[in-house]
Image (cartoon, rainbow, N blue to C red):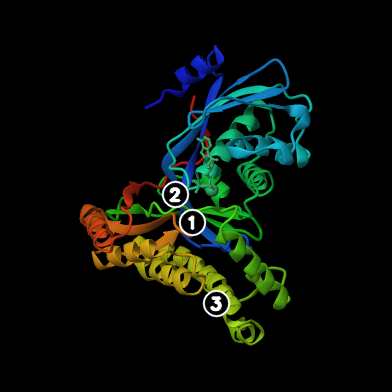
Amino acid sequence: MTDITSEFTAAYGRAPEGVWSAPGRVNLIGEHTDYNKGFVLPFAINFRTQAAVARRDDREIHLRSTFAEGEVVASLDSLSPDTMDGWSAYVLGVAWAAADAGVAIDAAFGLDILVDSRVPVGAGLSSSAALECAAGAAFNELWDWNLGDVALARLGRVAENTAVGAPTGLLDQAASMLGQEDHVVVLDCLTEEARAVPLHLREEGLGILVMNSNVDHEHATGGYGDRFRSCAEGARILDVESLREITADDLPRAQELLDEEAFRRVRHVVTENERVLATVAALEKDGPRSIGQLLDASQASMRDDFEITVPEIDTACDTAVAAGAIGARMTGGGFGGSAIALVPLEQADQIADAVRARLSEAGMREPTIFAVVPSEGARRDR
Ligand code: ADP
Ligand code: MG
């Protein structure tokens, strides 16, 4: 394992002043509801991105990653989303977003930054938000922004939307900023109010498996943008600001006004919002063993109505449930990426083996299956 402090020292010739970190996330339920101003229920995971940082005496940001060759240099006086490209946009984009929102970086000194990550990239676990939030946490402290967690999450979102060009909602950054051990974060994407809800996984003897299909997803150019536009178009035809305003009672009218495909897209969002709220209620009343059917219904809705799953994900979920999982569903933007299964800990290995065997029989790519633990959000490590 890389020691980020010694890597930083090797790269920049002096020790970092501090190390900040932020986790990836798994969305327990509530997919593609965030940009529709609905509800999501993610948790931060025990895989983190670290940023080691030290001040410079000029106004330049020097940026390195253990994932990439070389150094990116940018001036604080000419930050612009148009000139940022590649992975550095996730970090520089946060600084630009702050400046654009009126958070002063006029007097700020430059920074040397090295990032290193244990969050698998492109697996639907939001290595991108982990990177934005680790950088945001460091900037917030070193540049005296004094912003709260939700405000920092918003800057990460703006970076991702504007500097990177991926039209994602606040879900990823909220989870990465606000996560707590053994809790999920329920986020209302309309009001941006968030609250941690206890999961009680440990005392119930349960765990969560991530089943990475190893099928690549690509947010900025892929079907994610298509779904985003379908939802906006659905809202326009239904004459609402966002699909958040549509409830199950409105679905018959929606069916009359929308074509068949657009209707299914809207129905997913409406029913998914209801499932998120039902999951929160079930967790608070009856605990995590009571949410299996909601997870399975979400998977079916993503597969049939929203059409964002791939065969590898569908097979993994079906097999996990048949092998004893309490529930299983795709998580993340879709078109590949990962699914999760809520499992009794003593059956975890057996369920993982069953999924691997079934995908292999079907001639599908071998999945990577591992446990995740709901963990603490962004923080200063040292
Ligand atoms: P996900 O968020 O699901 O992992 P994304 O496509 O949203 O997938 O983000 C992945 C991108 O984030 C990578 O292609 C890379 O540009 C950037 N990234 C994530 N972690 C790092 C890192 N440690 N160093 C450099 N770039 C990173
Ligand atoms: Mg991402």
Report if the beta carbon of the residue with label 1 is closer than 8 angstroms to ligand 1: yes
User: Amino acid type of disc 3?
Assistant: Arg
In this image, 137 relative to 346: left or right?
Answer: right
Across and down, in percent, residue 327 comes to 34, 65
The type of residue carrying mark 2 is Ala
Q: Identify the residue shown where x is 33% and y is 59%.
A: 342
Numbered disc in front, either 1 or 2: 2
**Residues at marks 2 and 3, CA–CA distance in whole angstroms:** 26 Å
- How far apart are the alpha carbons under marks 1 and 3? 19 Å
User: Which tag, 1 or 2, sits closer to the chain's start?
Assistant: 2
Report the residue marked by disc 3: 264
In space, the residues marked 1 and 2 are separated at their CA atoms by 9 Å
Q: Report the quarter where the N terminus lies.
A: top left
Q: Which residue is mark 2?
A: 123
Q: Is mark 2 within 8 Å of ligand 1?
A: yes
Q: How many marks?
A: 3
Q: CB of mark 1 within 8 Å of CB of mark 2?
A: yes
Classed neighbour count for the residue bearing mark 3: other residues with Cα under 10 Å, few (<14), some (14–19), many (≥20) = many
Asked which quadrant contains residue 310, the reply is bottom left
Q: Position of residue 279 (x, y in %)?
A: 45, 65
